[in-house]
Amino acid sequence: MTDTSTQTGSKMDEGSVSITDTASNVAANLDALQTLAAAGKLASVTLTDAGAPMLTLTIGQLTDDAAALSKIVGNYMISVSGDAKAASASSASSTTGVADTESMIVAEIAKIMIWLDAEVPLLHKRFDEIQARLRRPLGV
């Protein structure tokens, strides 16, 4: 990751950093960025991908690294993978994409999580119903 440091005091440890890198590198280092953001040391994150960069995150990253995500400037998309229950008994995972501005995603994260908790089980139930119908002989 490219570190564009800015100093607010005479020592580097009193300053903050601005990061410029690809969405994949930022996602891979999001926990470290969260540590900087929580300490007040992360000024901004700029994604260098062409178009609207796609951050591929886990549910844990989405919820645990919100301070770092809030430092991303510009438009980007987030693809969230993982079960809404974080670690269900099922080994299958679902993928949900969210496309909006960073400020809207951060502002609505609680609603997104509530929706995932409510909708994912309903979608699985509906899929099971459709699958059962497809297994029935015609005319039954």
Image (tube, grey):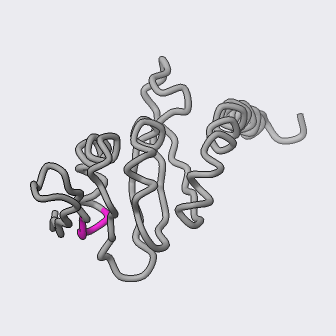
**Percent coordinates x, y for residue 21 in the rendering:** 23, 68
Does the magenta run of residues contain 20? yes
Q: Taking 120 as reference, is 60 left or right?
A: left
Quadrant housing residue 24: bottom left
Q: Which residues are magenta?
A: 19-23
Q: Where residue 46 sits in the image (x, y, percent)?
A: 33, 70
Q: Is residue 66 above or below residue 135?
A: below
Report if residue 92 lies within the magenta region.
no
Residue at image position (29%, 54%) is: 42
From this view, report whether residue 24 is shown above or below residue 94: below
* Outermost residue, front side: 10
69 or 53: which is nearer to us?
A: 69
**Residue at position x 58%, y 55% from top?**
105
Picture quarter containing residue 39?
top left
In front of the other: 100 or 8: 8
Q: In the image, 15: left or right of 127?
A: left
